[in-house]
């Protein structure tokens, strides 16, 4: 059993504990009377229908109480018309009240009154099932359950009794807690916003709320990302150092730079995925981040190194990069690249903005400059050139030579 397995087991156990905690924290809200049926009554000459519904604000204040709503029916010309209209209205109101309708809550449904503890318990089960069935990636599952744990902790002191109370105001207060009280970065706050939005979508799809309250909450400006493109001088130092001290990791660095394959995908590439005649590497949908099959070009400089290194002497089912960056029967973890890169960076006294993932930024930037944006997009397996441009080092993009002397023909 490897490190990742134990990590996932630990997360799963935490989620189960969270679900059990939510199950035992059934609030008093389940016992609250939510409405009193509509009645057609008369006071003097005034005829009206009245009923009572639970005041949402009173629940928030911790003193639940019913609020009376009254509708007059004196606008009709005859008593017969007044009676008929009032009785129709009374019956319709009673039907809607039984289904969970509350006129004091927008988009109210019968599920709007589900206790928020029950909602989160169902969400826990959904996450566990999604991870088990492969619908959700392991990393996503870990991220979501971590944020759910934070929300559950916050909710203990800022209680939501019902699903409908998951509104924009509460979500903004939670985000302020993450950003201000916990003193996190704008990026962390925005990541929580994205997760809250996904939770809101899940609740909408299941009828707990009528609309997603997070869609109108704005993200904070992130500024430039900390990770930077590796400049040529630094790259030369890296290659010289690794050539002398760790040639196997040097090949992994060059492979990541040319193929733009992500670290968590690299460790799952097998030798059989490499087509020598086509000069391609097949990235299966089962390991790809975008869950689509893809092929990337394998430049000749890499192919020749693989032949010299005897890569193809290993069985086809071997993983290209094992724990020591050579072919191995056992799959390694994506963190091996980052950990080895960190040691190399320390030895060369390079800034921490140069990360292993910077190789992808660097590779994309150099490809755009030398062979064009569309080629870089295809090699990176991006859905659009806009995504590819996001990875590129803007200060290194060059002017297009074809346009230097271009002018409109008359």
Image (cartoon, rainbow, N blue to C red):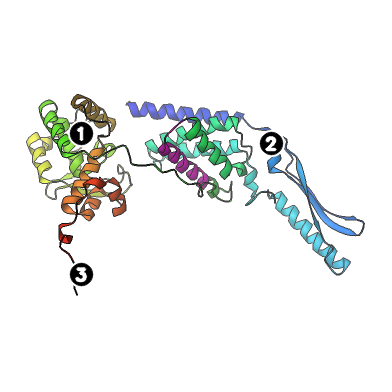
Residue 46 position by quadrant = bottom right
Of the two numbered discs 3 and 2 on the same chain, state the one appearing first in sequence: 2
Specify start and end residues of the magenta stretch as a single range: 183-202
Q: Nearer the viewer, mark 2 or mark 1?
A: 2
Q: CA distance from mark 3 to mark 2?
A: 69 Å
Q: Is residue 328 visible?
A: yes
Mark with earlier residue (2, 1): 2
Task: Please give the residue where the numbered disc 1 appears in the rendered image.
Answer: 321
Residue 74 lies in the magenta stretch: no
Q: Quadrant of the N terminus?
A: top left
Give the residue furthest to the right: 44
Mark number displayed over residue 169: none
Q: Which residue is mark 2?
A: 61
Of the 4 image quadrants, the one containing the C terminus is bottom left
User: Image check: 36 left or right of 15?
Assistant: right
Q: Is residue 132 visible?
A: no
Q: Which residue is mark 3?
A: 408
């Amino acid at each position: 059993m490897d490190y990742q397995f134990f990590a996932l087991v630990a997360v799963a156990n935490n989620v189960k504990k969270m679900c059990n905690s939510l199950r035992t924290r059934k609030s008093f809200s389940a016992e609250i009377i939510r409405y009193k049926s509509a009645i057609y009554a008369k006071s003097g000459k005034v005829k009206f229908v009245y009923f009572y519904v639970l005041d949402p604000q009173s629940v928030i204040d911790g003193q639940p109480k019913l609020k009376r709503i009254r509708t007059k029916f004196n606008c009709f010309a005859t008593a017969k018309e007044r009676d008929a209209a009032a009785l129709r209205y009374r019956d319709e109101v009673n039907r809607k009240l039984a289904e969970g309708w509350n006129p004091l809550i927008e988009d109210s449904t019968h599920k709007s009154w589900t206790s928020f503890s029950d909602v989160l318990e169902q969400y826990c089960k959904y996450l566990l099932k999604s991870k088990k069935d492969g619908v959700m990636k392991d990393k996503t599952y870990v991220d979501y359950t971590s944020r759910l744990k934070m929300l559950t902790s916050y909710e203990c002191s800022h209680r939501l009794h019902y699903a409908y109370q998951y509104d924009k105001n509460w979500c903004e207060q939670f985000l302020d807690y993450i950003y201000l009280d916990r003193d996190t970065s704008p990026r962390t706050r925005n990541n929580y916003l994205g997760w809250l939005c996904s939770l809101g979508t899940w609740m909408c799809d299941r009828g707990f709320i009528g609309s997603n309250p997070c869609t109108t909450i704005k993200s904070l400006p992130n500024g430039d990302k900390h990770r930077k493109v590796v400049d040529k001088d630094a790259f030369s130092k890296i290659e010289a150092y690794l050539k002398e001290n760790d040639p196997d990791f040097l090949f992994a660095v060059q492979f990541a730079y040319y193929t733009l394959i992500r670290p968590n995908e690299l460790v799952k590439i097998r030798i059989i995925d490499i087509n020598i005649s086509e000069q391609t590497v097949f990235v299966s949908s089962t390991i790809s981040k975008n869950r689509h099959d893809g092929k990337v070009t394998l430049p000749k400089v890499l192919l020749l190194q693989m032949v010299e290194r005897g890569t193809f002497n290993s069985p086809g089912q071997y993983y290209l990069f094992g724990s020591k960056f050579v072919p191995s029967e056992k799959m390694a973890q994506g963190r091996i690249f980052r950990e080895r890169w960190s040691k190399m960076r320390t030895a060369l006294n390079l800034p921490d903005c140069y990360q292993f993932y910077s190789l992808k930024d660097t590779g994309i930037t150099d490809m755009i400059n030398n062979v064009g944006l569309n080629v870089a997009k295809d090699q990176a397996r991006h859905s659009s050139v806009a995504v590819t441009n996001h990875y590129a080092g803007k200060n290194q993009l060059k002017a297009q030579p074809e346009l230097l002397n271009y002018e409109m023909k008359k």
